[in-house]
Image (cartoon, rainbow, N blue to C red):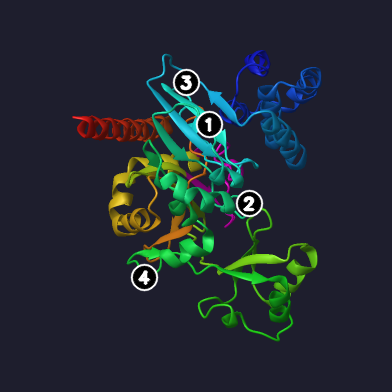
Amino acid sequence: MSSLSDTVSTQFLGLAPFLRRSIQGEDLQSLAEPWIERAQAEPDNAVLWMNLATLMLCLGQRDLGLTIQAQALAMQRHYRWPAARQPAALRVLLLTAPGDLAANMPLDCLLEDSDVDLEYYFVMPTDASEETPLPEHDLAIVAMSDSDANRASLEAMQPVVADWPRPVLNTPEAILNTERERASQLLQGVRGLNMPPTRPVTADTLATIAAGETDLAAIDPGIEFPVILRPRDSHGGHGLARLADREALAAYLDDSEHSDFLISPFIDYRDADGLYRKYRVVLVDGEPFASHMGISSDWMIHYLNAGMYEDADKRAGEAAWMASFDTFADQHHTALKAIDERAGLDYVCIDCAQTADGELLVFEIGNAMVVHAMDSAELFPHKQEHMAKVQTTFRELLEQRVQEDQAAIASESA
């Protein structure tokens, strides 16, 4: 922890060191009070305030974290995350958005031990109409995720990015394809791919369904009980519920303060042993890689609470899946290829499962899911090789795009 405290006021830390310590079970709360005292003593230190904002968000203090973040951004919008291995070989500009931990691609978690400098620039919707000086870079990545809060910025950036002087990965229009409803529409009609229809619905409409005045078919003919319901624009399982019937829906609405939701049919993806298995697959320039597999008796799987750290048998199951991932990728080649082509993203993550009849059941696609190599090599020796593949291939993609750009410039000037 001392290294964080030593650098908190001088170096932008990003998310990676906080996530690493959280995974290792270390106490982040112990940093809060001394960091707040330092921030109060250095009110003009934007880097310190931005690091404090990330700490607060990691501690679940969302409102406070966003308030502190806004104060940092009022002072400056460019933050540099230096490569672990210097001198850096590449400078990558991340076009990010203000927001919580789900607002942007956590690329520093993937590139912890790399030779790539990351230049974070926080974009506001007004930037498209202003002359904004940007840091020097070899390549840009639109790092913001699709969300209601980010959509105006993503849409405003489209004509700007189309005329960008350097290569750009994950264009704004491609990121917009990851919105749950849009993704479910894009991925229909693919052999071997099952992404249930996802539709927006208001609390008022749901109330009429709960009362028996309307049927679910009025929303979409493919939706029937049991259903999955979540507040619109929610992440991380917040407010997510499986509802078996009208009575369960009525009870859910009684406890919810939200007015807008997304609804989809629940697909039972239990395996023969009664356990649910959820995979995270990464596509780097269309090539699939294994990130992790969570195993749980609960249908709503989150890796950190699925018991993977406590259960050696579950870890062995994940290891077996990773070892046979080429077979998994071959089996779902058509589905994965369709996701790559239809989403149009250079880097995209897929949370998915397999149905009983062997289809790839897609829950979500996105550019801002966490992919990392921070798990204990003692507990998870099987992960090291596979995460190294993701890191190496992504690093090669960056280099390839920069070299292609340089070759094009040289050709034009010849």
Q: Is residue 340 left or right of residue 101?
A: left
Q: Nearer the viewer, mark 2 or mark 3?
A: 2
**Residue 244 in the image, given as x and y percentages of width and height:** 64, 72
Residue occupied by mark 4: 189
Q: Which mark is residue 109?
A: none
Mark earlier in primary sequence (2, 3): 3
For marks 4 and 3, give the CA distance.
Answer: 43 Å
Residue occupied by mark 2: 149
Mark earlier in primary sequence (1, 2): 1
Hey, what amino acid is under mark 4? Gly
For marks 2 and 4, give the CA distance.
Answer: 30 Å
For marks 4 and 1, give the CA distance.
Answer: 44 Å
Task: Confirm whether residue 350 shows in the render.
Answer: no
Mark earlier in primary sequence (1, 3): 3
CB under 8 Å between callouts 1 and 2? no
Hey, what amino acid is under mark 3? Ala
**Residue 68 in the image, given as x and y percentages of width and height:** 74, 33
For marks 1 and 2, give the CA distance.
Answer: 23 Å
Circle 2 packing at 10 Å, graded few (<14), some (14-19), many (20+), is some
Task: Confirm whether residue 29 shows in the render.
Answer: yes
The image quarter containing residue 341 is bottom left
Residue for point 53% across, 51% down: 156
Mark earlier in primary sequence (4, 1): 1
Residue for point 29% across, 45% down: 326
In this view, the residue in front, 315 or 326, is 326
Circle 3 packing at 10 Å, graded few (<14), some (14-19), many (20+), is many
Hey, what amino acid is under mark 2? Ala
Hey, what amino acid is under mark 1? Pro
Q: Which mark is residue 83?
A: 3
Q: Is residue 394 left or right of residue 111?
A: left
Magenta range is: 293-312
Circle 1 packing at 10 Å, graded few (<14), some (14-19), many (20+), is few
